[in-house]
Structure formats: C-alpha cells, structure tokens
Amino acid sequence: MNSTVQQIINTYKKDRFRLMDMLIDFQEELGFISKETVKDLADQLDISTVDVEQTLSFYHFFTTEPTGKYTVYLNDSVVAKMMGQEEVAKAFEEELGCNFGQVCEDNLIGLFATSDIGMNDQEPAALINNVPFTKLTPFRVRELVADMRAGKTVYEMYTEGYGGGNNKSVLVRSMVANHIRRIGPVLLNDCSPGDAIKKIVQITPEAVIEEVKASKIRGRGGAGFPTGLKWEFCRAAVEKERYIFCNADEGEPGTFKDRVLLTECPEMIFEGMVIGGYAIGAKKGILYLRYEYKYLGKFLNDVLFRMRGNNLLGENIAGLEGFNFDIRIQFGAGAYVCGEESALIESTEGKRGEPRDRPPFPVERGYLDKPTVINNVETLATVVKIINKGSEWYSALGTNDSTGSKLLSISGDCRFPGVYEVEWGFSIDDMLGMVGATEVQAVQVGGPSGALIGPDEFSRTISYADLATGGAMIIFGEQRDLLKDVVLNFMDFFIEESCGSCSTCRNFPVILRRTLKRIIDGKGIRKDIDDMEEWGQIPRVSRCGLGQTCTNPILTSIKNFRHLYEDLVDKDEDYVSEFDLSTAVQESCDFVGRIPNI
C-alpha cells in the first residue's frame, strides 16, 4: 500500500464515517483516486469497494484520472455567462489547444466546467488548484496560462492585491472581494467574540431556547422553519447524544452571502454553534463547508484553535463545569443537493449525498442516527445578536411574520453587486434602486429554485408572507434572452445536480428541457407550453427540495413571461415533426458504404 494512503487512513483512525475526508485528502495529495486506492480503502475500513466507489462517483471534485498539475474549474452559471464567461472559456481552449472536460496532452493543465463557485458578484471566476481567480478576461487567461507553463504557484499568479478584510489574511491570501454594500444589525460589528457565550452560561438551556423562540427568528437557508422550535424538538429527544451542524454548503447559483460571513464573521458563526450546542445539549458541532470554499479552511481552523485557547470551545466553556463542546469542519466535494439537510448528513457520514425519506426528521434521527439540529450560516450568526441584544430588540425589526433582517446576495445587471443587509419587508423596487439597476426585465428571487418575476411584481416585498428567499437575487436587464440565456441554463443546472434517486427529478427536467429547446429553436407548438405547465407539477412529489423545485425555472417563466414562449411557437400547427428520414438512415448507409436512396 502507498505510504501516503496508509498515513491518511490512519489520520482518521480507520473511521468509515470519515470517508469523505480521506477521499478529499487522497485527491489533493495524489491528484486523483485510483482503483488501487479504492481497494486499499475498502480493505482498511472493512467495507466493500462498491461502498467507496458510490461515494467517489457522486461528487463533482473527485476524479479517478489525473487532472493535471494545474486544475482549472471555470464557473458556467448564468451570471458568469452574462459577464463574459464564454469568451474566457474560448481563450483557455485556444491558448492550450484542448477543450473543456480534457487534460492537455502534456498533462500540465486540466480544463473543467463547474456549476457555481460562490463568486457571482465578481464573474467570470474560476478555481485554479482550489484558489479563486475572479473577474477573468481573455487577456488575463493568456497571462495565467503563461504563468502555469512557467511553473508558478497559484499565489505567484496574482497581478493585484488581496481582497479586503480577512481575504488578505496570511491564512487566506485571496483576491476575492467581500462587496459588503449595506451593513445592518447582523453584520454590524458591535459585540466582542464570546459575549453571548458568557451570557448563556448564566441561564439554563431552556431559557436560551425560549429567548430564541421569542425572537421569532426563522431559518435563513430558505425553508424558514422557526429556529427556536427546532432546538426545542431536539432537546426533547430521548437520546442524549446530540449534534449541531452549520450548513455552509451554499450551492445555489447567485448566492454568496455565507462566503462573506465565513470570511468576516467566523467567530460569530462558531459562537452561534456553541449557543446551539448548549441549548440542545450537544457535545459536538460540525461545520459542513462546500469544497469551493476550501481556500478558507486554514483560516477557519485557526479561528477554532484561538477559540479553544480563549475557553470559548472545548471543556468547561466560559468556566461552566461540564459545558463541553467542540467543532470540526467537514468539507463537501461538489454536490448542490447536499444543501438539503438529510443529504448533508449522509455526506458527512461518508456516503452519497442522497436525501433521506422523512420522517424521521434529523431532530429525531440525524447524524449517526442521533438527534441533530442543522442551521444555516446566517441563522447561527443572527442568534448571537439575539442573545446579546435580546429577543425584544430583534422582533421589533422587520415585519410581524418576518422578524429581523435578511442578507441578500445581489448580482447580475446592476452597478453594485454584493451583499446587502435589509430588514424583511423591503420591496424589489427599492432593492433595484439600491443596487443601481435600470431597464430591468426580470429578477430571479431565490436562485434557480425560486421565482422569475417581472416589472408588474416589483412592488412586492421580501418576506415569508410574500417573496420568501434564501438570499439570492439575480437581476436581468432588457437585453437578456430570458428563455435561452436564463431558463435553459437553470434547467441544465438542475439536470446536472439531481442525485438521480427520484424518477420524477431524474427524468422530468430532461423532458422539459428538451421541449424548451425545441421552442427556442422555433420548432415548438402552443400545446408544448401547456404540456410543460402540466408536466412541471409532477416532480413536486419528489422527496427533497431540489426535486420539488427543479421545474420552477420553466413554471415561473411561463406564469410571468408567457408571451416570450408564445412569440416563438407555431400558432397554426398542432404538430411539428422533427424527424428527418435522410438523417435517420445516413449512419447505417455510411456503415455499409451505400448512398441513401430516398
């Protein structure tokens, strides 16, 4: 057995539930994961090779073949394409003489596309050996390729300074910009790390839960379930071994607020996990961090190290005897579906990120079949402010049904893309004015799984009672082709990211995408629009949020922009045949050396 393989396996004490960590380490140390490594893993962990292979094959960033000394993952999300991604991709291919999805002949550079890397406020962007490069241009591509051929490290390829805030930390060294455009009650740095922890140790866990419930805060990941109620359910569980997770797997195209919180407010996020751990009686917490943010790993682990040194993590936290709680970071490996809480748990256990059937819910049987609370990054950061300033203060913000503030990731056709903190109840019209957006054709509220709305709905408000959102807001100007540039891209995303478990989610996006493409190509009929409306309802029976919302790009665009579809279909035909007999027989004729005689 390779000594590196053995060392990595031993690092995780041959724990099969740490399979994801082992595969990530193999990928980074060896460049790929070979059949021999798979066999060694299976033997050492006492599991079948199929168990290893099914996890290995599920995630985007695991490979079984070398991907080059420099591995380039270029974002191909809708905003990236709006900002010139196709020209950047073409420049890479022309400069290297190979196409995306390939490793160049000299095995120096591999080119790959990826769905989203959390940089929609500074596109086009790519990851090169896990380090983000933003605002790429064809000229910049030529410089990067020259640097790679010269053998430079990724950090030696920078031609500008580091980004602001903690991006310039020696442990991050990133060119990423935070783009914090509007600071509100959560982002406002008016509390010292540990203040909230020192407060909770003076009261009971039940009192902490009551304070969170009184604030009426709801989950900021999109589902909007009351946070205090979730904690109460978990604390009431009979099983005493419990866990709290922070879901930092923001994979929705158009979302990047959690990236900024992780960069600038990590102590507050971890403090929120400590508060949650105290409230539900957990001893361990896990931050599930998307692989695209691997560049933040050393920095975040250093924050945890310093918190332990300040008695804010570890044993007898803040001097309270018996209050023992610690946190570790679990990286994903590229799977949008792992943002769903049960799929996230499966991934953390070293499995494919397939959502579980519910019930039971994670608060009853979650990680390792123990009661588990999963909260979003923004939720946990907000809890700290609630403890510090009180539920009465927080519930006075926002609206009656949507208390507090909301962080928005705003990108697309606007002058000032970035992160904005607003109180719930903020209108879309006000949002567009705030970010400098004019001549707006549409806004995608909540990313691809949300709703595409037009100007007649811009007076609506961002709230759970009206336009609920996890935070992604993408703005499309009048120059954009909504069906070709936006809806088609979103459907490609869902087809790529489906785990394939439910037949509804596995099949219907493909069928709908094919029908949409036919309409865009001018071969559709009016009935195609009606069929898509009907078929788009079927995936709602899928078992997770991805499947239940995967047809929203088509359904909401038909609802609000039906005229775009009707302008493209043939209104006088009930049926348009796409069958071409000559094309159909050409392949067989070519094979036998005959000329089609039709």
Image: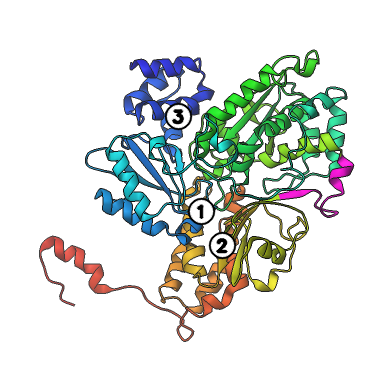
Which residue is labeled 1 in the image?
Answer: 494
How far apart marks 3 and 1 lie (CA) works out to 24 Å
The residue range painted magenta reads 391-406
Q: In front of the other: label 3 or label 1?
A: 3
Q: Secondary structure at mark 3?
A: helix
Identify the residue position indicated by label 3 in the image: 24
In what quadrant of the picture does the C terminus appear?
bottom left
In contact (CB < 8 Å): disc 2 and disc 1:
yes
Q: Nearer the viewer, residue 396 or 51?
A: 396
Cα separation between marks 3 and 2: 33 Å
Crowding near the residue tagged with mark 1, few <14, some 14–19, many ≥20 C-alpha atoms within 10 Å: many
Instruction: Place residue 157 in its image quadrant.
Output: top left
Quarter of image, res 60: top left
On screen, residue 544 above or below 491: above
Q: Does 418 appear in magenta? A: no
Q: Which mark is residue 260?
A: none
Mark 2: few/some/many CA within 10 Å (<14, 14-19, 20+): many
**Front label number (3 vs 2):** 3
Amino acid type at circle 3 is Ile
Viewport quadrant of the N terminus: top left
In the image, residue 344 lies at what x, y percent? 59, 36
Q: Is residue 536 shown to the viewer in this render?
A: no
Furthest-top residue in this view? 321
Label 2 vs label 1: CA separation? 10 Å
User: Residue 40 appears in which quarter of the rendering?
Assistant: top left
Q: Is residue 178 left or right of residue 88?
A: right
Q: Earlier in the sequence, mark 2 or mark 1?
A: 1
Mark 2 sits on what residue? 553
